[in-house]
Image (cartoon, rainbow, N blue to C red):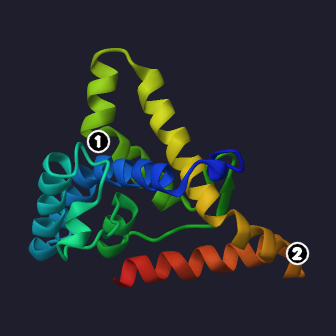
Amino acid sequence: AKAYGTLPPPVRQSVHDFLQNLDEPVIFANDVLQGQPHLAAKSLGRLAINTTVGVGGMFDVAARMGIPYHSNDLGVTFARWGVGSGPYVMVPVLGPSNPRDLAGEVGDSFADPGDYVAGQYHYLWAAVARSATQGVDTLSRNIDSLNDIEKTSLDYYATIRSLYWQRRAAQIRD
């Protein structure tokens, strides 16, 4: 993540935009499953605009046109359907989560067109590379904040757990 952070900001932003564009089909599906046609239309519009005008998603043209990115996943869908979160777990490599969200991540990976195509052609490396790149991108965007939290918190684990629950609750409310 530190080495990735040394890349020029426009390169990192294009990678981030591309990864977000790859997530749009799953976000769209979860918008539909949650009965949110307005958000589903935005997700579909973002996918169409960024894939075409945004050169395969390398540029977030849709955001510049007033269609901002929003995240959504099967864990949020399960939560809105009334499925309980279960206990907090710290998953190696993946980070903080809970059983509901882990099940959601598995479901999202099966529903993801990119992962599906990679699986059909036995390109497991492509799905792994995408996940690893997303992890590195996310960590690089948050590494300074995480370092500050580690330096200033009395109990780093408890602080991360609290921040995770607060962030997840906000994602579910939205």
Q: In what element is the residue under mark 2? A: helix
Amino acid under label 2? Lys
Out of 10 and 15, give the one closest to the viewer: 10
Query: How many neighbours does mark 2 have within 10 angstroms: few (below 14), some (14-19), or many (20 or more)?
Result: few
Q: Nearer the viewer, mark 1 or mark 2?
A: 2
Instruction: Give the residue furthest to the top.
Output: 122
Residue 10 visible in this rendered orientation of the protein: yes
Residue 80 horizontal/vertical position (percent): 31, 75
Residue 145 horizontal/vertical position (percent): 70, 73
Query: How many neighbours does mark 1 have within 10 angstroms: few (below 14), some (14-19), or many (20 or more)?
Result: some
- Which residue is located at x 63 percent, y 46 percent? 4
Amino acid under label 1? Asp
Residue 154 horizontal/vertical position (percent): 90, 82
* Residue matched to label 1: 112
The quadrant in which residue 89 appears is bottom right
* Residue matched to label 2: 151
Give the left or right position of residue 65, taking residue 77 as reference: left
Residue 96 visible in this rendered orientation of the protein: no
The Cα atoms of the two marked residues, 1 and 2, are separated by 38 Å
